[in-house]
C-alpha cells in the first residue's frame, strides 16, 4: 500500500505534456506564494557537485542531465527542450524557475520553481530526490516533454512553510555535518583509549542519534552536538552488557535505518551525516554506508557466536538489503562492499563449505528481491544500461574519486589514511578486521567519496579492534587449517 501511494504521488498528471519552460531571473522562493494558487511549487537544485554557474545550469536544464562539476563541463548531448527567458511569470500552463547567475559559484543554494496548471497542486514531488518540495534540474526536461520520470505533486496544507522548513534543514545539516563528524570521532577515540568496553555500544548509539536527529528535523547545531554526546555517554551504561545484548544492539541499528527509509526517507536523507543534497539526495551517504559496516560485521559475529551460522547469514542479508535495496539505502557500491566483507569474514571464520554457499545464496537472493521490488534508484539506473553502462558508471566514479582525493588539503587525509589502513592490513590476522579492511579497499574502488570512506574506515577499524573480545583469531575449519599450516612451517626446536 505504501509503495502504491508513493507511486501515485510521484506520477505526473496526465495533462502535463508539452509544458513551456520559462526562466524568470528575478524569481525568488518568496514569490512562490502567489504561484502556489496556480500549481505546485518547490526548490530547485541547479547542478551536481560543489560548484555551478549560469552556463552549467542552463546546459543541464536543456539536456535533462547533470555532470558533477569536478568532472568538467556538460557537453556532447543535444538539447532536449527549448528554454525561454522572461522578466515575469507567464500566463497559462508552464514550468517557471530561476537559475544561478554569473560565473563559477558554490552549488549551495536552491532556486524557486513552479509547475503551473496541468493538475499540479501543493509541493512538487521528484523521483530524483524523493524529498517533497526538492527538485533536481534533471526533472524539468522530462516534465516538459511529458515523459517518464516526470515531476509529480503531493498535497500540502502550507507549501511555502514546508519549503522554508526544508531549506532551513538542508542549510542546518550542511553546517552541522563537520561538527557532528568530528565530535563523534573525538568521543569514539576517547572511549577506545580510556574505556574500550564502551566503544562498540557508543558507536552504535551515535548512529542511532544521527537517525533520531534526522527524524526530529533538528536545525540547531548545538542540539545535534548534544545528541551525539548523550548517545556516546549512554554507550558507557551498556559497556558491561553481554554479547547477546551487544549483538542485538548492533542489529537494531540496521533495523532502525531500514524502517526509517520505509516510513520517511527524509529521516536519513536530512540527517546530519546524510547525503549532501547537491549531488546525492536520498538513501545512504558514503560516510553512513561505511560506518554501518561496523554494526553489520559486529552484529553478525556476536549473534553468530551465540545463535549459529544462520544468525550470521540473517544479519548479512539484512545489512545488504538496507544498503543496496532500491527503496532503502540505494547504494550499489555499498552493497558490493558489504558482500565482499561478509564473504571474507565467512571464509576466514567458517571456511569455504556448504553453509557459506547457502548463506551467500540467501544474501544475494535478498538483495535481488530488494532491487526488483524497490523500483528505480541509483542502483537500478546503473544496472539498466548493461555491462557497458556499468563500466562507464564505475569509470566515472573512479575519476570523481581521484578528483576528490587530490583536491587540496583533503589529499593528506586520504593518502595518509590509506597508508595507515594498508599498514594495518599487512600485520592483521583477525578475520573480522581483515573483512573490514577488504571492504574499505573495495569501497575506495567502487565509491566516489574517498575522504568519507577513509575516515569511516579508520573509525571502524578503531572500534572493532578496541572492543574487548570481539575480534578473535579464526576458529572452526578455517582456523584449524591456519593453525595446521603454521605448525607445518614452524621451525622444529632442538631436544
Image (cartoon, rainbow, N blue to C red):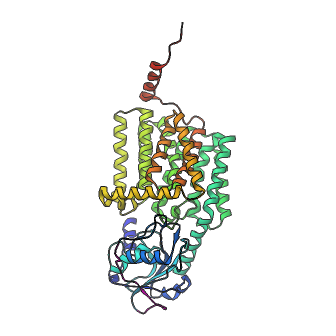
Is residue 198 placed above or below 41 in the rendered structure?
above
Question: What residue is rendered at 51% in x and 51% in y?
Answer: 290
Is residue 80 placed above or below 435 in the rendered structure?
below
Point out residue 475 in the picture as x, y percentages from the top left corner.
47, 29
Residue 239 in sight here:
no
Point out residue 191 in the picture as x, y percentages from the top left corner.
66, 44
Question: What residue is rendered at 56% in x and 69% in y?
Answer: 170
Is residue 66 placed above or below 207 in the rendered structure?
below
Q: Main secondary structure of the magenta part?
A: loop
Residue 444 in sight here:
yes
| Position of residue 322 in the picture relative to residue 364 (left or right) | right
In this rendering, the count of numbered labels is 0
Point out residue 423 in the picture as x, y percentages from the top left corner.
55, 39
Point out residue 392 in the picture as x, y percentages from the top left corner.
36, 58
Work out which quarter of the rendered image holds the C terminus and state it.
top right
Q: Foreground residue, 157 or 488? A: 488
Is residue 302 placed above or below 287 in the rendered structure?
above
Question: What residue is rendered at 55% in x and 42% in y?
Answer: 421
Q: Tell me if residue 396 is in the magenta stretch.
A: no
Q: Foreground residue, 219 or 106? A: 106
Point out the stretch of residues depicted in magenta: 77-91
Work out which quarter of the rendered image holds the N terminus and state it.
bottom left
Amino acid at each position: 500500500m505504501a509503495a502504491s501511494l508513493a507511486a501515485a504521488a510521484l506520477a505526473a498528471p496526465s495533462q502535463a505534456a508539452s509544458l513551456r519552460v520559462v526562466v524568470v531571473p528575478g524569481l525568488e522562493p518568496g514569490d512562490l506564494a502567489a504561484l502556489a494558487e496556480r500549481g505546485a511549487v518547490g526548490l530547485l537544485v541547479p547542478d551536481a557537485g560543489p560548484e555551478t554557474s549560469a552556463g552549467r545550469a542552463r546546459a543541464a536544464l536543456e539536456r535533462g542531465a547533470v555532470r558533477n562539476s569536478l568532472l568538467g563541463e556538460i557537453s556532447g548531448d543535444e538539447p532536449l527542450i527549448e528554454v525561454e527567458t522572461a522578466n515575469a511569470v507567464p500566463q497559462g500552463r508552464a514550468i517557471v524557475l530561476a537559475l544561478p547567475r554569473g560565473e563559477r559559484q558554490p552549488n549551495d543554494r536552491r532556486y524557486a520553481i513552479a509547475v503551473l496548471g496541468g493538475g499540479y497542486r501543493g509541493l512538487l514531488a521528484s523521483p530524483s530526490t524523493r524529498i517533497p518540495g526538492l527538485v533536481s534540474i534533471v526533472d524539468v526536461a522530462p516534465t516538459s516533454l511529458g515523459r517518464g520520470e516526470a515531476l509529480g505533486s503531493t498535497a500540502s496544507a502550507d507549501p511555502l512553510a514546508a519549503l522554508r522548513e526544508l531549506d532551513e534543514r538542508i542549510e542546518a545539516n550542511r553546517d552541522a555535518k563537520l561538527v557532528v563528524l568530528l565530535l563523534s570521532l573525538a568521543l569514539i577515540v576517547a572511549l577506545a583509549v580510556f574505556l574500550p568496553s564502551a566503544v562498540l555500544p557508543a558507536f552504535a548509539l551515535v548512529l542511532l542519534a544521527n537517525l533520531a536527529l534526522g527524524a526530529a528535523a533538528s536545525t540547531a547545531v548545538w542540539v545535534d552536538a548534544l545528541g551525539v554526546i548523550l548517545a556516546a555517554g549512554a554507550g558507557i551504561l551498556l559497556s558491561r552488557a553481554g554479547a547477546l545484548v551487544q549483538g542485538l544492539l548492533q542489529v537494531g541499528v540496521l533495523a532502525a535505518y531500514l524502517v526509517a527509509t520505509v516510513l520517511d526517507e527524509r529521516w536519513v536523507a536530512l540527517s546530519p551525516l546524510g547525503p549532501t543534497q547537491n549531488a546525492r539526495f536520498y538513501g545512504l551517504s558514503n560516510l553512513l554506508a561505511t560506518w554501518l559496516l561496523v554494526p553489520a560485521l559486529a552484529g553478525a559475529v556476536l549473534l553468530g557466536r551465540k545463535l549459529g551460522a544462520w544468525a550470521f547469514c540473517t544479519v548479512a542479508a539484512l545489512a545488504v538489503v538496507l544498503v543496496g535495496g532500491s527503496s532503502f539505502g540505494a547504494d550499489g557500491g555499498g552493497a558490493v562492499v558489504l558482500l565482499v566483507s561478509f564473504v571474507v569474514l565467512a571464509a576466514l571464520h567458517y571456511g569455504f563449505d556448504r553453509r557459506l554457499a547457502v548463506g551467500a545464496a540467501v544474501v544475494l537472493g535478498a538483495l535481488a528481491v530488494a532491487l526488483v521490488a524497490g523500483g528505480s534508484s541509483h542502483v537500478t539506473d546503473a544496472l539498466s544500461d548493461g555491462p557497458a553502462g556499468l563500466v562507464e558508471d564505475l569509470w566515472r566514479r573512479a575519476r570523481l574519486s581521484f578528483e576528490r582525493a587530490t583536491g587540496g588539503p583533503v589529499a593528506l587525509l586520504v593518502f595518509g589514511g590509506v597508508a595507515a589502513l594498508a599498514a594495518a592490513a599487512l600485520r592483521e590476522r583477525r578475520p573480522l578486521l581483515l573483512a573490514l579492511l577488504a571492504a574499505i579497499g573495495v569501497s575506495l574502488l567502487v565509491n566516489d567519496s574517498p575522504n568519507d570512506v577513509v575516515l569511516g574506515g579508520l573509525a571502524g577499524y578503531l572500534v572493532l579492534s578496541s572492543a574487548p573480545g570481539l575480534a578473535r583469531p579464526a576458529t572452526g575449519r578455517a582456523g584449524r587449517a591456519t593453525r595446521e599450516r603454521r605448525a607445518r612451517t614452524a621451525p622444529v626446536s632442538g631436544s
